[in-house]
Amino acid sequence: MPSGIFSVKSLKNSLQTARFTDLGNDFAWNNWNPTKVNFLAWRISLNQVPTLAALACRNVFTGQIRYRLWGQHDEDVDHLFVSCEVAQFVWNFVSHWCKMSSIFAFRVKDLLDWHKHVQGCRKWRKLAYAVMQVALWVVWRSRNDLVFNDKQINLDQMTNEIKQIGVLIDW
């Protein structure tokens, strides 16, 4: 279309470049991860995952909004993925496993921006970001197993799943 003449090829090129340019925030898509992992991380960045607090805000009554594991805090994205003890254990594991300095975050946005500050080359930062997204995926799946299947959180199983999926990252 730069020449002013329409072609299917030019339309295809335009659509491919515009595909993920505006995701509603400054979220960075990581093509080393499966689409479902990226999609979950993107939804987390927009606070669009159905946590108990988010459902309550949408007038969906679930009977509770407290985090099911200990019930001391509302289950929102920041608590579930950043400040609960399970999430803190996961981020401690990820930083040790990847041989990086500890991950300190107060909000989900801090986690999603963390890879930008990792020491190393661009490829290493992209790998760290991929592992971080996988960890978000594992936390979410473990939470869902607790809520829907009444399966207790198993930290060893979570770390093994992060390792298994992390090793398969296509880099």
Image (cartoon, helix red, strand yellow):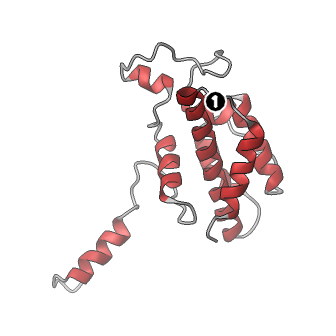
Q: Is residue 30 left or right of residue 43?
A: right
In the image, residue 75 sits, relative to residue 130, either above or below, namely above
Query: Where, quadrant-wise, is the N terminus in this rendering?
Result: bottom left
**What SS does tag 1 mark?**
loop
Q: How many marks?
A: 1
Q: Quadrant of residue 104?
A: top right
Q: Is residue 105 left or right of residue 53?
A: right
**Which of the pair 149/47 is nearer the observer?**
149
Residue at 19% x, 83% y is 7
Label 1 Cα crowd, 10 Å radius (few <14 / some 14-19 / many 20+): few
Query: Where, quadrant-wise, is the C terminus in this rendering?
Result: bottom right
* Residue 34 in the image, given as x and y percentages of width and height: 52, 60
Residue at 72% x, 70% y is 121
**Which of the pair 53/149 is nearer the observer?**
149
Q: Is residue 78 left or right of residue 38?
A: right
**Type of amino acid under label 1:** Lys
Residue at 75% x, 37% y is 155
* Residue located beneath label 1 in the image: 151
Is residue 128 visible in the rendered image? The answer is no
In the image, residue 124 sits, relative to residue 9, either above or below, namely above
**Which of the pair 104/132 is nearer the observer?**
132
Q: Is residue 135 left or right of residue 48?
A: right
**Which residue appears farthest toward the top when viewing the image?**
63
Q: Quadrant of residue 97?
A: bottom right
**Which of the pair 167/85 is nearer the observer?**
167
* Residue 133 in the image, given as x and y percentages of width and height: 60, 51
